[in-house]
Amino acid sequence: MQLQSKVNINNKKKIFNDPVYGFISIPQEIIFDIIEHPFLQRLRRIKQLGLTHLVYPGALHTRFNHVLGAMHLMSKAIATIRRKGHEITQSEEEAALLAILLHDIGHGPFSHALEHDIVSGVSHEDISTYFIERLSEEFNGELDLALEIFRNTYPKKFLHQLVSSQLDMDRMDYLNRDSFYTGVSEGKIGSDRIIEMMTVSNGSLVLEEKGVYSIEKFIVARRIMYWQVYLHKTVVAAEYMLIHVLRRAKELTQQGENIFASPALTFFMKNDITAVDFKSNPEVLEKFAQLDDFDILGAIKVWQSSDDQVLSNLAGRIIDRRLFKIEVSKIPFTQERIDEAKANVLANIDISDSEVDHFVYTDKLTNNAYNHEKENINLLMKSGEIMDVSEASDNLNISALSNPVEKYFLAYPVFNTSKPKQLSLLKDIK
């Protein structure tokens, strides 16, 4: 028994070889235990960028990669702030590391695309809170302080800002990581220098004045990554197709049809789950913890051969990457243009007028690289004055980047009448 205990202790001092930062060490045993927990291991089965690999083939990294990277950056930030004379106790460090490690645990598969269809009115941040509460119960209250930091109820506000703010470890990791895996080099930021410039003033996170140029680069990189990766028009088209294929499957399920799905996915298609359900029924969180990308993709693969034309058409297009054409405009599309796209769908697919909305999408894209009204990125000037980065910067672009940019899109299928319909081929196989 003593030998076994010794092996377990040593086993918790693992390191991860990360392609972005190199070796990432596990600083505390509780962190190893949380990483090993099925709730966190689920993040290995959820891609960080959803369907973005349909545009950038290398974007297959997972949320598990991301949370480990964010934890690594948190460890460096804490060391920097301590070195500058600000007290962070061992328990606070452990809690902050746990909070950033678990900040994305509430994401579902293809989270941003499906956040409003798998569940209703419950953000992934809310679900992360429910997971952390459950884990703290399981670990006899060891995550209570992490929960306070995550919820921003702990007195040292800068610890929460390191987890969630406009300059948190979450954003610093995903910009560098997503840049690395997509190959979009414009997204790479100087995270080491930014962290080195961090300090605390009046209980809040600030950066030393000499870090202003690194912050300028950070904000510009974020703007570029949104247009080039996160809001890339082809990615947007694919995500809306995914939203509507799942929405259609849920409609059919709730009409009593027997739609193929895993037990966990079936649960969320049969039930309209809200925040109240997460709080009142422990089974809901357990079911959510069983959902990952494989549930969705496995179902879509089967739905290609569905008797329902809407479901089979959308599913087949996603699987074979026959994505909708998408137009982007600085002004909203006219109703006449939208009706024209709908008429073309009705002329090529045997569906009803009420079903055509599953094939024609129009909405607004908003890119807000820096929202100074929400929470500032503050600089500590040499004079001791605290100043918003958009005011302190001598780069006029920073002030411009603090204004949101809005664009409109119209997405719709393109039909090739010279090829046999994919649907009929699948039905013959069936």
Image (cartoon, rainbow, N blue to C red):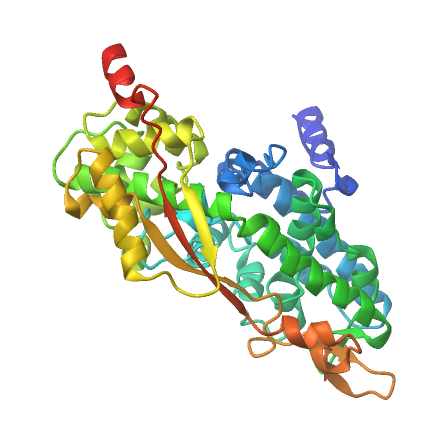
Residue 152, x across and y down, in percent: 55, 70
Q: Quadrant of the C terminus?
A: top left
Whether residue 191 is visible to the viewer of this picture, yes or no, is yes
In the displayed structure, would residue 92 be above or below residue 387?
Answer: above
Name the residue nearer the viewer: 388 or 170: 388
Relative to 45, is 215 above or below?
A: below
Residue at figure coordinates x 36%, y 57% from the top left: 122
The image quadrant that residue 95 belongs to is bottom right
Q: Measuring from the top left, give residue 395's x and y in whole percent.
A: 77, 74
Q: Answer with left or right where residue 337 lies relative to residue 371.
A: left
* Point 82% across, 56% down: residue: 192
268 displayed left or right of 147: left
Q: Is residue 3 above or below residue 354?
A: above
Number of numbered discs present?
Answer: 0
Quarter where residue 120 is shown = bottom left
Q: Farthest residue in the top direction? A: 429
Which residue extends farthest left?
256
Between residue 369 and residue 96, name the one nearer to us.
369
